[in-house]
Image: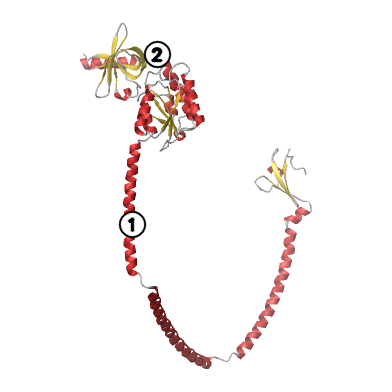
Amino acid sequence: MLTVSALNQAVGRMLERNFPLLWVKGEVSNFTRAASGHWYFNLKDEGAQVRAVMFKGRAQYAGFMPREGDKVEVRTLVTLYAPRGDYQLNVEAIRRSGVGDLYAAFLQLKERLEREGLFARERKRALPGFPRRIGIVTSPQAAALRDVLTTLRRRAPHVEVVLYPTPVQGEGAGQRIAAAIGRASERAECDVLLVCRGGGSIEDLWSFNEEVVARAIVAATMPVISGVGHETDFTIADFAADLRAPTPTAAAELAASSRQDWLAELRGHAADLTRALRRTLADKAQSVDWLSRRLVSPSAYIQHERVKLLALQNRLSHANQIPLTRMRHGLQQLASRLAHQLPDTRHARRDLAELARRLQRAQGAQQSAQRQTLTTLHSQLELLNPQRTLERGYAIVSDHQGRVLHSPAELAARSEITIRLAQGSAEVGIASVQPRLD
């Protein structure tokens, strides 16, 4: 006997086991975005419909919000909502119907360019703090251009704007956008370049997903800001640009800081500088007053110092005379006592001279004997010197590690040995080794 809850849970597990993750195509109806961020809608075709839910964690990466009647394709799991006993689709990903191939091409190109390093963070260039001229690559008829110009006129009317007109949609638009970026790069008359257009479908924005546009942005001689589509739209140009803005208006705001903000900051710095200067002047004025009170006449100061110097000179002279007199008297007393205490050293000097002569004769004899011994040892050592053996035509054989070889058994064919001769050494290769012949 099963309860209703157990039955629904069993059916749900069976659906999840038998229907793997798959793509389902249909039309959106009854779309609702809950306060929690979850999406609830029905997916239908001419003959049937099914409930679907896409939770907030997945919906935030969708790239667009579906509307009533949109043709979409969803990547989903088939599940059962147990409290109501309704089976539904748990949507993992969603894309507009018919753009699956485009999106796959987008992902392939993005992955390939990312491997080449075109999107690397270290390649990104910083925007200038005070641009004097801003370039814009877009269509002259685009609403995005009006938004950008209005924003720049409001925030930075002093900045010059250069338009590099190009179609941003249609056949060959990608090549023409890249050419406009290249033209701006060659002319090098702008401090920063905006590449922008308004929102649209993935087909409308596809020109900014072309490889030629991405490479033109990377090769530009100035920093590039991409402002293509709405906040949820991402293109290859966004990843290649030095900075991505969610909208064309945001790109204009990022390119030029508000003049009012800069002026307010400058006024604040000027006020701080004025206060600091006044405080410094007040401190210096107090120092001058304090020094002026200490200032005396130079002649009076010199006379005062002369008197001090004369007093110090007298004290020094008196201090030197007293110790010298005392020391002279003490030295005379010591000399008198020393004269009475000195022994008669004449006999000791004669004995010392005799001992020195005997020592000199003994040292001479010992040195002569040691020199004779050294000559004998040198002759013996010379007989044992390997160099003399080498000079008689012999040689020393060693391996590549410097180990001296004594037997043919220590040799191997196709190995190298070192032969040391009397006048140098040689590296020799062994062709073969034969046993000792008696």
Amino acid marked by disc 2: Gly
Closer to the N terminus: mark 2 or mark 1? 2
Is 160 above or below relative to 94?
A: below
Q: Which residue is mark 2?
A: 98
Q: Residues within 10 Å of mark 1 (few under 14, many from 20)?
A: few
Quadrant in which the N terminus appears:
top left
Helix, strand or loop status at disc 1: helix
Q: Is residue 183 visible?
A: yes
Q: Position of residue 75 (x, y in %)?
A: 36, 17
Choose between 335 and 100: the one closer to the eye: 100
- The residue lying at 44 percent from left, 88 percent from top is 326
- The residue lying at 76 percent from left, 54 percent from top is 389
Quadrant in which the C terminus appears:
top right
- The residue lying at 34 percent from left, 46 percent from top is 269
The Cα atoms of the two marked residues, 2 and 1, are separated by 76 Å
Q: Is residue 22 left or right of residue 213?
A: left
Q: Position of residue 114 (x, y in %)?
A: 46, 28
- Furthest residue toward top: 47
Q: Position of residue 42 (x, y in %)?
A: 28, 13
Q: Which residue is mark 1?
A: 281
Q: Position of residue 191 (x, y in %)?
A: 45, 34
Q: Is residue 218 left or right of residue 380?
A: left
Dividing the picture into quarters, in which one does residue 375 lie? Answer: bottom right
